[in-house]
Amino acid sequence: MLWLDAIDVWRGPSQVLRQVSLRVEAGEIVTLLGANGAGKTSTLLTVSGHLRPRAGRARLAAAGREADLARLAPPQIVAAGVAHCPEGRQVFGGMTVLENLRLGAFLRRDGEERADIDRMMGLFPILRERSSGLAGQLSGGEQMMLAMARALMSRPRLLLLDEPSLGLAPQMVERIFDVITRIRDTGTTVLLVEQNAAMALEIADRAYVLESGEIQLSGPAATLVDDPRVQEAYLGVLPAPAEPGPADGRLS
Amino acid sequence: MIPPRHVLAWAALALVALAVTAYVETQLSGYARTVVGFAGISAILVVSLSFSNGLTGLFSLGHPAFMMVGGYVAAVLTFPVSRKGFMLPALPEWLAGAELPLFPATVAGGLAAALVAVVVGFPVLRLRGHYLAVATLGLIIIMRVAVNNADGLTRGALGLNGIPRLTTLWVILGWLAATLVVCWRLKHSSVGRSLMAIRENEMAAACMGVRRASSKLIAFSVGAFFAGVGGALWAHLLTNLTPGSFDLVLAFMLVVMVVVGGSGSLGGAVVAAIGITVLREVLRPVEQAVGAYGLVQIIIAVLLIATLLLRPQGFFGSAEPAFLRRDTRDRKTKPGRKNRPPEGPGRFPEHTAKQEARHEKA
Amino acid sequence: MSGAYVLQQLVNGLVLGSLYALVAVGFSMIYGIVRLINFAHGDVMMVGAFSAYAILTAFGLPLWSAVLAVLTLGAVLAMLIDAVAFRPQRGAPQVNGFITSLGVAILMQNLAILTLSGQPRPFNVPGWLKENIGFMGARMTVLDAAIVLVTLAVLGALVVFVKRSRAGLAMRATAENPLAASLMGIRINRAVATAFGLGGALAGLAGLLWGARAGQIDPLMGFLPGLKAFVAAVIGGVGSLPGAVLGGFVVGFAEVLFVGLLPPLYGAYRDAFVFGLLIVILLVLPNGLLGRSVEDRA
């Protein structure tokens, strides 16, 4: 579905990704782990077309054929079935919940948006309750659900999720991860960026570990959970699955 | 303050300036002297504008207003007593009988402008972002209305003419040197450093005990002082003053010089001020000969827009020529940081502007 | 000071306020979406006035064609300015865009002086527009009434467009958060162009109406009204459409009442008064009357 092949990405004067290669196959949950500033968000922004690789190839399977990401503008990437749910939720705070959902379906003109809005409200009942309220007045967890629902409104085949657990209460985190699994089960592939490595590895099929813009480790999630380097840097040495890893942990 | 190895460069620069001044003053026509005088005064104005805008991280368009204050105050002080009675009947006794030499009048003009800056700056500097630009533009209009209506003190819209031509190129050169030295020293004083801190991160600076309001006010009024001085010199070079000369177009010209010179660079400001003034004066006769009024401003506006699109850091960036830099420690820490937008990262994703990379590299 | 006199001043304020509102709305939309104080906006109004002059006086075409033409020309001109001068700088410090707009304003004014001369020209409108229809005893011409009604109708249509249409939705989303809007598949440059186009169309229309009411036009006519419309937008709360309309009427009324109700001596200070009002309001209400805190979020 998505292949990054040795890409280099720069943001202004600094290089944020070095020779990053990763692949996401249809139906998978792939998680990308790493500390702050490791390049996780940059990877997602590259996939959604907001950063351009200077070197390497980025390909996307769209409508039965492979497209070169570098040739697509962000709206075309959305149209090709990639939805990016950004870090920090970024809901449109001054607009209503309903308008936020409509914006998620901005490029769709198949007449089924209403039905999808209903479906989202079934998935996240709080959104039905607050549908005419301003998104900015929702709580952090509610905004996260809105951001995910908004991303799903484009009927993506690949969902990019950037730190959905950030700043949420543990209970809410559980719910969000539960929803992510259900999203995959309905046929949407997920590329998940997380600092909460324990939970991400629990639901993911495969994982990559980014460090200073380079992929350091990769493999099936079940294998990485047991890797001592991952355990030390991201999971805490003692098994404590519900605890988030240290925010600025470094692989030594 | 000057590293020893740069003494030679400084001496050479000073010699060139003195030689050019001496040559123009003694050998060239009155018109050429006026043009060169304008260039020098523009340099004073642009250096001080670049200084106060650069240090506060705010964008003021108020220089013409301060020039107006300085110009009128100084002109009233030097005006011949014999003619004050019928031309400026509303002057109080002690002013009507006074006739000062240029230097104290210029200082008084500068101080009056600085005083206005303090009074106005106290509320206005609290405005964030570009509201200040509009508020200072408003200040120009307010000042102009005030001068227009105070006929007894200023002769209003008629304009004040017959001001003695006291400004020589030597006077301008002296004030330009003073402006450069003061702005330079202040930029590297503790006030300058607190202002840099404010510009980079207002909140963090405030947390570290930097007093934002007073530091900004100092930079703003020092800028205004030299604008007032510039206005005073201008009045005694041109020998007449009308409120209409201090308008948006003047503010615009100064802004162009700051931008082309590269905001933050005092040396660039001087070069741009002199270059653009001379360019304008060279083109003006052409404009009149062809009858294509507006041509000069069109050319300068295009120059500005082209600079911003193609070379937004100006032709000199924020760099100073080597001998103008304070010392090597400065050189290591400053470049790169100076051109950072005061607002932090832009609002727009990178793909919306093709030139993005160019801005970032600056 | 009779009641009729005060009523007359109120009518004048309403008309002037309508014109400011038309221009202020464009300012506010453009600021809201790109955080740009567009000094050239008032000059789009000037171009609108000259185009209307050409159509009505030089070509002798009917009024409705002039209205259509200024709406179109204003929109096209504003979008062109955006594409040429502002779009390449998106992502640069905001102050650059603002200085650029100053350059564009000076450029447009002087191009107009160069091609049309700086002399004011009489702007004649059909005689029936000048007829007095009266308003509760106060003098009000057909034109005055038309200015107010057209303004209200156009602003109403604008609100519906922004609230209901797909392009309006895209515009609002981009104003809130350009990156998130882009993630939804919105073409940001197109959304920004929409704001410039709408603002330009309204400014063009305002130029026609301003010229018709003032009876004469000149290349510098757009500058001061443009600046005051910006003051209106700031007073109302920049970025807020209802705020811009409210601000327009506040400035219109304040200006007219200042001149009309104070002794004539103070009349000369009206422009100073408007900017004094701006400074006071910004200090008391930094976000304007109806604005949300935009500056800090930006």
Image: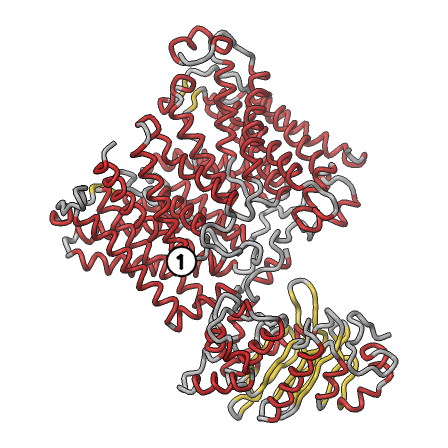
On the image, the x and y values in percent for residue B213 come to: 64, 39
Q: Nearer the viewer, residue C236 or C121?
A: C236
Horizontally, residue B279 falls left or right of residue A177, namely: left
Using the rendered image of the protein, determine whether residue C234 is visible from the camera's viewpoint: yes
Q: Nearer the viewer, residue B301 or B246?
A: B246
Q: Nearer the viewer, residue A181 or B310?
A: A181
Above or below, A209 against C246 in this view is below
Q: Residue at x 57, y 27 (%)?
A: B115
Q: Quadrant of residue A184?
A: bottom right
Q: Quadrant of residue C169?
A: bottom left
**Amino acid type shown at disc 1:** Leu
Colour pattern: secondary structure
Residue position marked by numbered label 1 in the rendering: C241
On the image, the x and y values in percent for residue B103 come to: 59, 17
Horizontally, residue C229 falls left or right of residue A162, namely: left
**Image quadrant occupied by the N terminus of chain C:** top left
Q: Residue at x 30, y 54 (%)?
A: C204
Above or below, C120 against B106 in this view is below
Give the structural element (helix, strand or loop) at label 1.
helix
Horizontally, residue B107 falls left or right of residue B331, namely: left
Q: Residue at x 77, y 82 (%)?
A: A198
